[in-house]
Image (cartoon, helix red, strand yellow):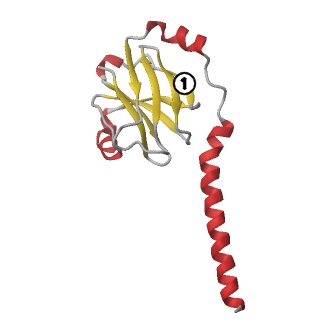
Amino acid sequence: MKIARLIKLTITHVVVGVIGFALGIYSLPILTAPAPPNSAQLEKVSANSRYDTAFTRNLADSDFLHWGEGSVTIGPDFITFTGELSPGPDFKVYLSPMFVETETDFKALKTTMVQVGDVRTFTNFIVSVDSDVNIDDYTTVIVWCESFEQFITAAKYK
């Protein structure tokens, strides 16, 4: 009887620990995220954008934990996003020469892409584009979770 109770307690504590750990990984980026850029900042930065597009939730590998929804502008100096992303750690913005909407496709084409920068907020963002990156060489903007190799969202801009 004591052994069965000990096993039951061990299993329940491990399950609660795993759930707590997962919730911590999910919520920590939300708690530590800086304030998102406001609409005036987004308008100023996106004033010289060349392309407009949108992230949508209905992509093949987007799901209830990995998604983005809102408008995106791509310019030679900045990529801006007005909308919401699912929260998570270590999100990166990539530019790709081809549209992708799955993890498999992303991994297969990653060597042809350029990593533009980090996403630190989940409501609106501004990411600087390095001067050596020519946005006209690419067609798609992608948000990718580097830590867990998860596709978040993508949008074709040309």
At label 1, the amino acid type is Phe
In the rendered view, does 125 fall on the left or right side of 27? Answer: left
Which residue is at 49% across, 45% downward? 65
Residue 143, how many percent across, how many down? 44, 34
Count residues near mark 1 (Cα–Cα under 10 Å), then give few for <14, some for 14-19, many for 20+: many
Relative to 101, is 50 above or below?
Answer: above
Residue 156, how many percent across, how many down? 32, 26
In the rendered view, does 125 fall on the left or right side of 61? Answer: right
Residue that lies at the very extreme toward the bottom in this rendered image: 1
What residue sits right under mark 1 in the picture?
Answer: 125
Residue 50: image quadrant is: top left
Q: Quadrant of the N terminus?
A: bottom right
For this rendering, which residue is in front, 127 or 88? 88
Which residue is at 29% across, 39% downward? 109
Residue 145, how many percent across, how many down? 47, 41
Relative to 113, is 102 above or below?
Answer: below
How many labels were placed on the picture?
Answer: 1
Helix, strand or loop status at disc 1 = strand
Relative to 140, is 50 above or below?
Answer: above
Residue 48: image quadrant is: top left
Q: Quadrant of the C terminus?
A: top left
For this rendering, which residue is in front, 131 or 35? 35
Relative to 131, is 19 above or below?
Answer: below
